[in-house]
Amino acid sequence: MDTPAGSTRTAIAPASGKLAVLLPGLGAVATTLIGGVEAVKRGLAKPIGSLTQMGTVRLGKRTEHRSPLVRELVPLARLDDLCFGGWDLFPDSAFESAAHAKVIEPALLEQVRAPLEAIHPMAAVFSSEYVKRLNGTHVKQAASKRALGEALREDIRRFMKENGCSRAVMVWCASTEIYIEPTAVHASLAAFEKGLAESDPAIAPSMIYAWAALKEGVPFANGAPNLTVDIPAIVELARKQRLPVAGKDFKTGQTLMKTVIAPMLKARMLGLVGWFSTNILGNRDGEVLDDPGSFKTKEVSKLSVLEHILQPHLYPDLYGKFDHKVSIHYYRPRGDNKEGWDNIDIAGWLGYPMQIKVNFLCRDSILAAPYEH
Ligand SMILES: NC(=O)c1ccc[n+]([C@@H]2O[C@H](COP(=O)([O-])OP(=O)(O)OC[C@H]3O[C@@H](n4cnc5c(N)ncnc54)[C@H](O)[C@@H]3O)[C@@H](O)[C@H]2O)c1
């Protein structure tokens, strides 16, 4: 997480009381997280994939054999203290949304029906300019983007009060917005707040959620590759409020593979000639990503991962010029059970070409959900 620059020591509040977990987007990932936590709390399943629940930290030398669990070493909220809420443009409860997503099997879902049925999304701040493939009715109407932001702030305050929460975090689990680049309205907090009042078209809904969260003292993490918090205006607000902002896509499926294989190539000084990735996916996320604008946001983020890891400027002979192609095809029969193929053309000693093939048959939201805590 980004800590505010210039701060000497940041006081971190103790993890006491109930923690509101506020999720814009109550879709497949969000409901798999909530249903999963409820199942784990009841001893119906294990929190596999969760660093906070299963991870350990080595202390001292290897020979000292001191490896406490992360959750015993770091003061983290207990699963029992989490209180989930969210927003969506569809009014379905978390149970109905989870049933629609078909990620959690019906028998398990039935056992966590009550807590999921109790979660009804608040009306969304949504614009079909930013997510072209969706059209919902459970959407806030207000005179300006500033007024929409104020309505979200009101939602946060009301949720915390009604549920007796002492702290909150917000994690963007909503659809991937179209690709946009930063402009003057994103350059400073003053310009951004003026833009909110004037409903500047370059302010995306996700930015309004981030602004509202930070104004209410709530940290914000981004599970999608949207620009959202990667703009000077939001970073300025986060610093002012001394709050962390984090995230750029969950990076849990095909991008996870990229973040593992690319460092391996670099560690052995093997060259990269080309990386061809393709996917079939049949959930709502796949439907949204079938739109070229939303897809470009994903594509740029996936490419930036490779460039960040491989540092082409330091290794021009190895990574100065590689082809990178990504495609995501919406293919309904697969639902959330995605299939990804990677063909990686690499170069070894004397430039001799070799290939790596990866066929990842994964469950998209099962991979993403544990990453949220
Ligand atoms: N599933 C994965 O493995 C995975 C991995 C990495 C990133 N992601 C990203 O996480 C996000 C969620 O994925 P998902 O599979 O749950 O998708 P999903 O389509 O099932 O859920 C997204 C939900 O967000 C809602 N939504 C869209 N815009 C909104 C807004 N402005 N306010 C409130 N709600 C809004 C939609 O109605 C939908 O219910 C996507 O952006 C996706 O690209 C997913």
Image (cartoon, rainbow, N blue to C red):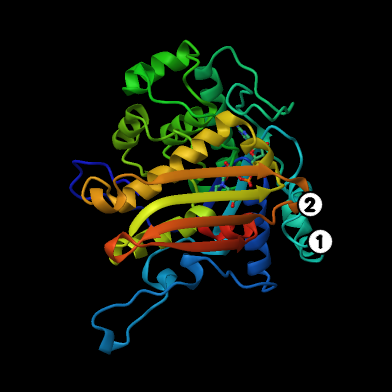
Q: CA distance from mark 2 to mark 1?
A: 7 Å
Query: Residue visible at 60% across and 38% down?
Result: 175
Query: Callout 2, which amino acid?
Result: Ala
* Residue 318 to residue 55: above or below: above
Marks 2 and 1 in Cβ contact (< 8 Å): yes
Quarter assignment of residue 126: top right
Query: Callout 1, which amino acid?
Result: Pro
Residue situated in front as seen by the camera: 350 or 3 = 350
Residue situated in front as seen by the camera: 204 or 241 = 204
Residue of label 1: 106
Quarter assignment of residue 36: bottom right
Question: Can the viewer see residue 248?
Answer: no
Queried on whether the Cβ of the residue with tag 2 lies below 8 angstroms from ligand 1, the answer reads: no
Residue of label 2: 99
Q: Quadrant of ligand 1?
A: top right
Q: Position of residue 145 (x, y in %)?
A: 52, 18
* Residue 136 to residue 8: above or below: above
Residue situated in front as seen by the camera: 237 or 257 = 257
Local secondary structure at mark 1: helix
Question: Can the viewer see residue 24?
Answer: yes
Q: Left or right of 317: which side holds 132?
A: right
Q: Position of residue 114 (x, y in %)?
A: 77, 56
Quarter assignment of residue 27: top right
Q: Position of residue 221 (x, y in %)?
A: 46, 44
Query: Residue visible at 68% across and 49% down?
Result: 281
- How busy is the neighbourhood of tag 2: few (under 14 within 10 Å), some, or many (20 plus)? some
**N-terminal of the two: label 2 or label 1?**
2
Query: Residue visible at 26% across and 89% down?
Result: 63
